[in-house]
């Protein structure tokens, strides 16, 4: 038996929503899991890039294709949660989501692997259980929640491991331009530069701005959103890893139609959120800033994907 699951890309954090906000975007990975009949064949994992990436495709060489692969680990956790060991599995990953750029490529494969394996097992786990396992593997729910559910999602993992989430309506006419540079940044490096503790005033700054962001989204308030998209607990520390990040944010600060410019997840991709603003101007501004540092970039203006992971029939 063979099951394929299509999973959207995701962007996490959106500035002050560190580790708890994320939204799904219409770029997809498709994960297919097949139980092989021949015993002793072990696990086989194939990565199939489906788009020409601006980064050399050799990035795929660094991804383990054995039982150390993150998809296999997630699948193994699911099997173990029902007292079983995974059988011989062939896992194919057709990948449109750029890797190590802050667009949820690992969340997508973890979610796809879990949903496919769950179906192969006769669906013993419900959405809540899958979300908890995916969060355990990823370390935070902000990418896996919208990858499973679609849309704009606020999520939090509670002390007992369960994930609480709510979907919010992203205003239709707020454009999201994803700016994807031609260099990689792994989440582990981007997290390693964060401090273990932050000053109280920075924690207060972020709680205020996160509350403002949620209110702005729920009430379609562009003015409030422009004030809300600020963060002091992860972006300032990550700036040193992303050439041009500061200049890009500065460039749009006084443009009324640009509501904000934030890192996509742990970066290095950046999101420019705008309202009735010239999208070509956004692209040319970012292209010029990165171009001056010999960084090439790809740009996509995207709508929020409301559909989460889907089993393909
Ligand atoms: N919230 C995570 C981070 C997203 O910023 O590190 C990356 O997976």
Image: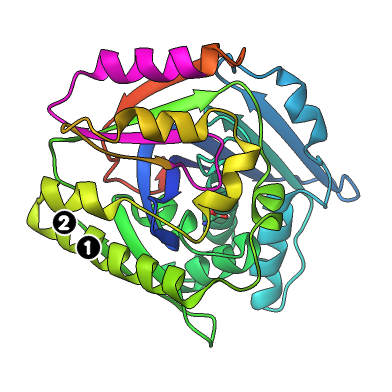
Tell me the residue that label 1 is attached to. 212
Q: Position of residue 79 (x, y in %)?
A: 68, 68
Nearer to us in this view, 309 or 120: 309
Q: Which residues are magenta?
A: 263-289
Residue occupying the point 16% across, 31% down: 257
The answer to whether residue 52 is seen in the rendering is: yes
Comparing 129 with 42, the one in front is 129
Marks 1 and 2 close (CB-CB < 8 Å): yes
Q: Does residue 167 appear left or right of residue 265 in this picture?
A: left
For label 1, the SS is: helix
Residue beneath disc 2? 216
Q: Which mark is residue 19?
A: none
User: Is residue 116 visible in this depiction of the protein?
Assistant: no
Residue 228: x and y in percent read 26, 55
Residue 274 within the segment the image draws in magenta: yes
Circle 2 — which element?
Answer: helix
- On screen, 38 above or below 216? above
Q: Residue at x 81, y 41 (%)?
A: 64
Query: How crowded is the residue under tag 2: few (<14 C-alpha within 10 Å), some, or many (20+)?
Result: many
Mark 1, residues whose alpha carbon is within 10 Å: few (<14), some, or many (≥20)? many
């Amino acid at each position: 038996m063979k099951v394929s699951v299509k999973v959207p890309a995701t962007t996490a954090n959106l500035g002050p929503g560190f580790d708890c906000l994320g939204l799904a975007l219409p770029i997809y990975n498709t994960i297919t899991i097949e139980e092989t009949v021949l015993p002793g064949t072990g696990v086989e994992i194939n990565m199939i890039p489906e788009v020409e990436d601006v980064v050399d495709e050799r990035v795929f060489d660094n991804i383990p294709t054995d039982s150390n692969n993150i998809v296999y680990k997630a699948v193994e956790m699911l099997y173990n949660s029902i007292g079983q060991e995974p059988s011989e599995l062939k896992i194919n990953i057709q990948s449109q989501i750029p890797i190590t750029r802050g667009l949820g490529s690992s969340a997508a494969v973890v979610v796809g692997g879990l949903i496919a394996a769950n179906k192969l097992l006769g669906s013993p786990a419900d959405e809540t259980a899958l979300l908890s396992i995916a969060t355990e593997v990823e370390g935070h729910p902000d990418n896996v929640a919208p990858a499973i559910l679609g849309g704009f999602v606020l999520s939090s993992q509670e002390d007992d491991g369960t994930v609480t989430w709510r979907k919010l309506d992203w205003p239709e006419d707020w454009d999201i331009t994803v700016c994807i540079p031609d260099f990689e940044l792994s989440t582990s490096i981007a997290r390693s530069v964060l401090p273990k503790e932050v000053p109280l005033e920075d924690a207060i700054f972020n709680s205020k701005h996160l509350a403002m962001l949620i209110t702005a989204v729920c009430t379609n308030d562009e003015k409030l959103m422009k004030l809300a998209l600020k963060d002091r607990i992860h972006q300032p520390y990550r700036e040193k890893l992303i050439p041009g990040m500061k200049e890009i944010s500065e460039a749009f600060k006084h443009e009324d139609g640009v509501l904000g410019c934030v890192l996509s997840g742990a970066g290095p991709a950046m999101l420019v959120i705008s309202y009735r603003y010239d999208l070509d101007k956004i692209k040319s501004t970012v292209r010029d800033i990165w171009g001056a540092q010999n960084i090439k970039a790809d740009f996509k203006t995207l709508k929020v994907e409301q559909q989460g992971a889907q089993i393909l029939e």
